[in-house]
Image: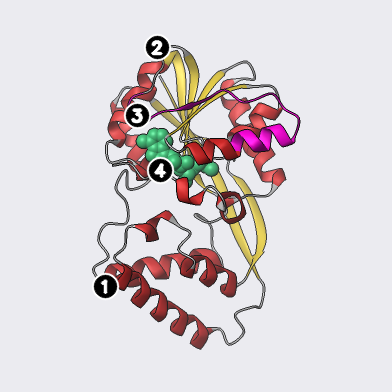
Amino acid sequence: MSIAFDQAAGYYDESRGIPREVEEEAADRVEAAVGPAARLLEMGVGTGRVALPLHRRGRQVVGVDLSLPMLERYRAKAAAEGLPPPPLLRADATRLPLRDACVDAVLEVHVLHLIPDWELALAEARRVLVPGGAVLIGRGGGHRGGQGPRMETLNRFDQLAAELGGGPRRVGADDDTTKVAALVALGGTAETLEPVVWEQQETYAEALAAVEGRIYSFTWRLPDQVFHTAAGRLRAELEAAHPDLDTPHQAGHSFTLTAVRF
Ligand SMILES: C[S@@+](CC[C@H](N)C(=O)[O-])C[C@H]1O[C@@H](n2cnc3c(N)ncnc32)[C@H](O)[C@@H]1O
């Protein structure tokens, strides 16, 4: 079973949001890679973190997601800005309700790790692309990728949970290299685009609260006992290492797209 984000719809943007200027630069990268007239599909569009800036520019982006609450959140954000409703489909990325060869590019950002049949989703992406089309795989963002308190805290929690037998972190694709390699095996040619980089202030207190609040999908599948023990050890370690958890630290982040062209 894929992991739908129904439970995260209310807090997704607050916890995974990226600065507005970074969103705009990411949209610039997409446009530079595929052209402003491209018909785009985003699989696992969520609340439109990536698609909304393109929709705002009048670009054609169809969003597909399993989670109705996430799609509703995206629709409400577009409406609040006075934009027309974005074209959205509640559907599974492994069975896209689209005909063959009908889009110029497919976007995938932080989705295939949630899908056990992720290779099927990539085959579907390939099927709906026109000849010469591209799949754009995104990585990084405000909570994954980069360095700083948030990344350090999440990585340490991962280690502690794994030591307690927390099981595989992901139900789907392990990382972006794996996704890109699978697309190359389908006949694509990969090109990594210039990353968008930015800095932000973070505290260990916020990072710890995010883990303890169980807002990240990798914590949802952990047995409660593993989760609570790992979170307790994490807090003890951080309190020992950083007497003032509320001190802000500068953190560097990046968002990178790899274009795989067919
Ligand atoms: C981490 S969010 C990423 C959302 C967006 N791409 C972004 O970068 O902000 C992952 C999204 O993928 C959706 N999802 C998970 N499995 C899916 C599937 N099999 N088909 C379509 N969407 C799926 C979830 O419901 C969630 O909205």
Depth check, front residue: 2 or 184: 2
Considering the numbered disc 2 on the image, is that residue within a helix, a strand or a loop? loop
Q: Are marks 2 and 1 in contact (CB under 8 Å)?
A: no
Question: Residue 256: in sight, yes or no?
Answer: no
Question: What label does residue 99 carry, if any?
Answer: 2
Asked if marks 3 and 2 touch (Cβ < 8 Å), the reply is no
Distance, label 3 to label 1, CA atoms, is 33 Å
Amino acid of disc 4: Ala
Badge 3: residue crowd in 10 Å (few <14, some 14–19, many ≥20): many
Residue in front for this viewpoint, 25 or 39: 39
Farthest residue, direction right: 82
Q: Amino acid at mark 1?
A: Leu
Q: Which residues are magenta?
A: 74-95
Residue 248 appearing in the image:
yes
N-terminal of the pair, mark 3 or mark 2, is: 2
Badge number at residue 164: 1
* Residue at left offset 58%, top offset 43%: 195
Which residue type does callout 3 highlight?
Leu
